[in-house]
Image (cartoon, rainbow, N blue to C red):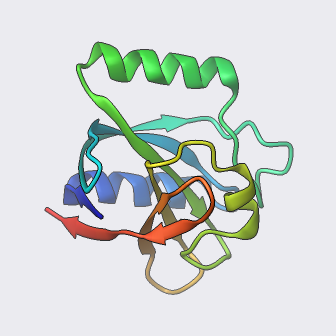
């Protein structure tokens, strides 16, 4: 499984994560979704509606519908979602797995815990996250 990610989109996601610190940020990835390889063309920012946004993320249902409509109107597919871990590792947490709701889609995580941001990506199988190769274009 591979996620193709333009450097400009990656940089925009990292900038969103930095701007949102100390809270987690969240957004959608749009482009062309494939079973073995997906290509991101654009990231859509969302507001973190979680009750505890420093350690959780959530997109409100009405905003999620609006995002999905915008992605569809642009002629793109949902590729997955992104969020940040301002103080945590760049891998899915147990909470991330408990809340994942899109089997077969990519979940990109930006960790800001170190000196430099770490960007990683996983596909949710419906039961677990599997590491996904990320090709920065």
The answer to whether 63 is drawn above or below residue 44 in the figure is: above
Marks counted in the figure total 0
Instruction: Classify residue 79 by image quadrant.
Output: top left
| Image quarter in which the N terminus is found | bottom left
Residue 111 appears at what percent x and percent y?
54, 73
> Looking at the rendering, which quadrant does residue 101 occupy?
top right
For this orientation, the residue located farthest to the bottom is 115
Pick the quarter of the image with the C terminus: bottom left
Pinpoint residue 129: horizontal percent, then vertical percent. Answer: 55, 66
Q: Nearer the viewer, residue 50 or 37?
A: 37
Q: Position of residue 86 (x, y in %)?
A: 63, 68
At a point 62% along the width and 67% down the height, the residue shown is 85
Residue nearest the viewer, comparing 45 with 60? 60
* Left or right of 99, for residue 89: left
Residue lying at 50% horizontally and 42% vertically, measured from the top left: 27
Q: Residue furthest left?
A: 137
Up-down: is 89 above or below 81? below
Q: Position of residue 109 (x, y in %)?
A: 51, 64
Residue at 46 percent of width and 22 percent of height? 68
> Measured along the vertical axis of the image, is residue 129 above or below residue 73?
below
In this rendering, would 40 be left or right of 85? left
Residue at figure coordinates x 62%, y 35% from the top left: 47
Image quadrant where residue 42 sits: top left
């Amino acid at each position: 499984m591979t996620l193709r990610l333009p450097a400009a989109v990656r940089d925009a996601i990292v900038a969103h994560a930095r701007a949102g610190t100390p809270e987690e940020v969240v957004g959608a990835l749009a482009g062309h979704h494939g079973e073995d390889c997906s290509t991101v063309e654009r990231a859509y920012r969302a507001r973190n509606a979680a009750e505890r946004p420093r350690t959780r993320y959530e997109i409100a249902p009405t905003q999620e519908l609006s995002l999905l409509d915008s992605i569809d109107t642009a002629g793109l597919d949902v590729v997955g979602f992104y969020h940040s871990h301002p103080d945590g590792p760049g891998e899915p947490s147990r909470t991330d797995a408990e809340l994942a709701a899109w089997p077969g889609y990519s979940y990109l995580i930006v960790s800001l815990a170190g000196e430099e941001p770490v960007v990683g990506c996983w596909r949710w199988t419906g039961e677990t996250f599997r590491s996904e190769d990320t090709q920065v274009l």
